[in-house]
Image: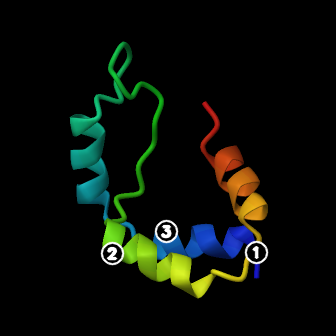
Amino acid sequence: MSAQQVLSALREMSCPDKAATLADFFQVYAGGYGEGDKFLGVVVPNQRKVAKQFRELPPISCTKRLAGCYAR
């Protein structure tokens, strides 16, 4: 198991329409509240499903990998 597999599983559940809606809500544009943030559009129930699949993966492994994917 790897953090890359977690990211792949999240991307499989992503919804571009939901990502766009969240980006608008959190104001990811220049000067906005969430400037630079990126969204996959994965709803919380699906995030929990992925988390359960990978619960044996050390948290630090995921944190470092996922943070690196979305560095500003």
Which disc, if any, is residue 2? 1
Q: Circle 2 is placed at which residue position?
A: 45
Q: Quadrant of residue 55?
A: bottom right
Q: Is residue 61 above or below residue 37?
A: below
Query: What is the distance, in whole Å, between disc 3 and disc 1 at their CAs?
Result: 15 Å
Residue 45 placed where, x, y %?
Answer: 33, 75
* Placement of the N terminus among the 4 image quadrants: bottom right
Disc 2 element: helix
Which tag is nearer the camera, tag 3 or tag 2? 2
In the displayed orientation, state which residue is furthest to the bottom.
Answer: 53
- Give the crowd class for mark 3: few <14, some 14-19, many >=20 residues within 10 Å: few
Residue 53 placed where, x, y %?
Answer: 57, 86
**Label 1 close to label 2 by CB (< 8 Å):** no
Q: Circle 3 is placed at which residue position?
A: 11
Query: What is the distance, in whole Å, between disc 3 and disc 2 at their CAs?
Result: 14 Å
In the displayed orientation, state which residue is furthest to the top.
Answer: 31
Instruction: Residue type at mark 2: give it.
Output: Pro
**Label 3 close to label 1 by CB (< 8 Å):** no
Residue 13 placed where, x, y %?
Answer: 40, 74
